[in-house]
Image: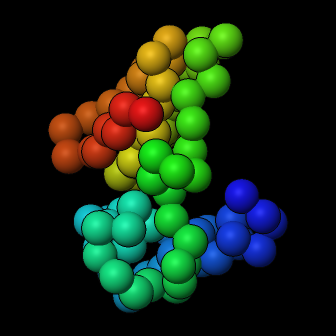
Amino acid sequence: MPVDALQRVYRGKVCVDLAYAGRRDHISGVLAGGLNGAFKFDATTVFDDTRTADTLWGRAGTDWFIYGTKDDLMDQTNGETTTKI
């Protein structure tokens, strides 16, 4: 994904005008529009690097974990989203 596309997705992620679910839905492409424009995270733009296991930490706030086959989710809490790729 080109740098400008990642910047647009980041803008959609940090948008203060929408709650978590709205930002996630824009970035995933479920909901049209948003500051990310046409750029989204889905099966065509994110892939599972099955060669290595990743450890994913969300820390504070509500997180959206996009994870692969060998990945470990360490601190997922109720209300957070997980998407296996």
Q: Establish if 69 lies above or below 23.
A: above
Residue at the image position 66 percent from the left and 12 percent from the top: 52
Quarter of the image for the C terminus: give it.
Answer: top left
Residue 19 seen anywhere in this rendered image of the structure: no
Quarter of the image for the N terminus: give it.
Answer: bottom right
Locate residue 39, reporting x and y percent. Answer: 56, 72
Q: Is residue 69 left or right of residue 78?
A: right
Residue at the image position 36 percent from the left and 51 percent from the top: 62
Q: Establish if 3 lies above or below 62.
A: below
Locate residue 30, reporting x and y percent. Answer: 29, 67
Q: Furthest residue to the front?
A: 44
Q: Quadrant of residue 36?
A: bottom right
Locate residue 15, reporting x and y percent. Answer: 48, 80
Q: Establish if 34 lies above or below 27.
A: below
Locate residue 42, reporting x and y percent. Answer: 45, 53
Q: Is residue 25 left or right of residue 70?
A: left
Q: Quadrant of residue 76?
A: top left
Give the camera-side residue of 55 and 60: 55
